[in-house]
Image (cartoon, helix red, strand yellow):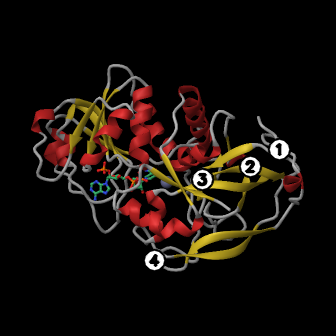
Amino acid sequence: MKTNTNNKIKSYGQGPYNTKGMALYSTDGHFKPIQFQRRALGPKDVAIKLEYCGICHSDIHHGLGHWKKEIFPLIPGHELAGVVVAIGANVNKFKIGSRVGIGCLVNSCRHCNQCLEGFEQYCEKGPILTYGSTDRDGSITQGGYSTLNVVDEDFVINIPDLIDLAYAGPMMCAGITVYSPLRKWNVGPGKKVGIVGLGGLGHMGVKLASAMGAEVTVLTTSKDKINDAKQFGAKHVIINENGINLSAHRRSLDFILDTVPYQHDLDRLISLLKMDSTLCLVGVGKVTESNQLNPFSLVSSRSSFAGSLIGGIKETQELVDFCASHKIKPEITKITTKEIDDAWDKVINKKARYRFVIEIN
Ligand code: NAP
Ligand code: ZN
């Protein structure tokens, strides 16, 4: 593990830490600077100077109030990457200078069956999310569009030296969210896998499923992404605009991972599954817009319709190590903190290629 013992790192104490961030004050999608404090270190906490944070479509759903009533000011960001600058008395996994990532989770009950099995994201009591959750001290968690975070070491991911920190951020959510279902549904050699939506999650899905040995088909609404999809490892690309007839591809796929963030037609996707196969939804749109699903789509080929939520901490470390060993990295565009509003507009309009990553300064 790389260590960095320069004077700048030595100057960080045990906190609390004055922190700067970019916050939303309402659902208008307009960011403004904010100053706030991160808590002083508990015995198992690490303080992390953040260097990068990816922009996930979930940040947009939260920020624009697509899912629930949010508490403002809200600092989004759950694809964090940075360097440990201070450690609590009982920290043993990290040291000052460790290169680390934080994803969507910063704590969970740690006692329920799911937590004990490493599925903290499905914690019975509900996991504490990186932003917009009530933390153990009663404060509201704030995310990675900020200069520093304090997190329990059990929820921190080690980033191997082979991975540049700028690329590590998007692995923390986009990467693990597709890796976990690809593993759960045994994607590998001999399997034909459909990835729907070539965005932040989708492009990582293509790279990972290809690296696992599957034959990948991308379903995209964007004709200008065809070449990219093939470069990322897809063997076939289907243009999935409403009205386009997909019957030529009926019952051709063993598994479909659907990353589309807004309302769309599920019946036409289910029709692409072979008998006894699964469509897994990871894209979650506005709660006010549900996708129609005709029961005949499922019963007529004994198909399964499933969902999956990010991944646990152990599995996230596994994904990062898989990316390091297979030389997989996200396609990123670095932006400054002043460009977040514009980047959100581009993500909503399918213009991200394929993940915006904020350089924290
Ligand atoms: P993204 O970068 O915006 O990618 C989504 C892609 O879906 C777009 O690039 C586009 O691909 C397609 N798309 C967008 N709008 C569409 C529409 N109205 N109809 C059809 N296709 C559309 O988003 P992301 O960051 O990958 O996130 C995708 C979704 O997953 C979001 O809903 C997000 O909240 C959710 N998510 C879920 C989890 C989880 O744990 N389940 C974790 C992270 C994110 P094409 O141009 O190829 O059509
Ligand atoms: Zn995310």
Label 3, ligand 1: CB separation under 8 Å: no
Question: From what the image shows, is residue 197 above or below residue 350?
Answer: above
User: How many C-alpha atoms fall within 10 Å of the one at disc 4: few (<14), some, or many (≥20)?
Assistant: some
Q: CA distance from mark 1 to mark 2?
A: 9 Å
Question: Between 5 and 98, which is closer to the camera in this rendering?
Answer: 5
Labels 1 & 2 near each other (Cβ < 8 A):
yes
Q: Amino acid at mark 3?
A: Leu
Q: Earlier in the sequence, mark 2 or mark 3?
A: 2
Residue 343, labelled with which disc? none
User: How many C-alpha atoms fall within 10 Å of the one at disc 3: few (<14), some, or many (≥20)?
Assistant: many
SS of the residue at dot 1? Answer: loop
Nearest to the eye among marks 2 and 4: give it: 2
Q: Residue at x 33, y 32 (%)?
A: 234
Q: Earlier in the sequence, mark 1 or mark 4?
A: 1
Q: CA distance from mark 1 to mark 3?
A: 26 Å
Q: Residue at x 49, y 76 (%)?
A: 30
User: How many C-alpha atoms fall within 10 Å of the one at disc 2: few (<14), some, or many (≥20)?
Assistant: many
Q: Amino acid at mark 4?
A: Thr
SS of the residue at dot 4? Answer: loop
SS of the residue at dot 3? Answer: strand
For disc 2, the marked residue is 83
Q: CA distance from mark 1 to mark 4?
A: 39 Å
Viewer can see residue 163: yes
Residue 4, labelled with which disc? 1
Q: CA distance from mark 2 to mark 3?
A: 18 Å
Question: Between 78 and 297, which is closer to the camera in this rendering?
Answer: 78
For disc 3, the marked residue is 105
User: How many C-alpha atoms fall within 10 Å of the one at disc 1: few (<14), some, or many (≥20)?
Assistant: some
Please indicate whether residue 101 sits to the left or right of residue 249 in the image: right
For disc 4, the marked residue is 27
Q: Amino acid at mark 1?
A: Asn
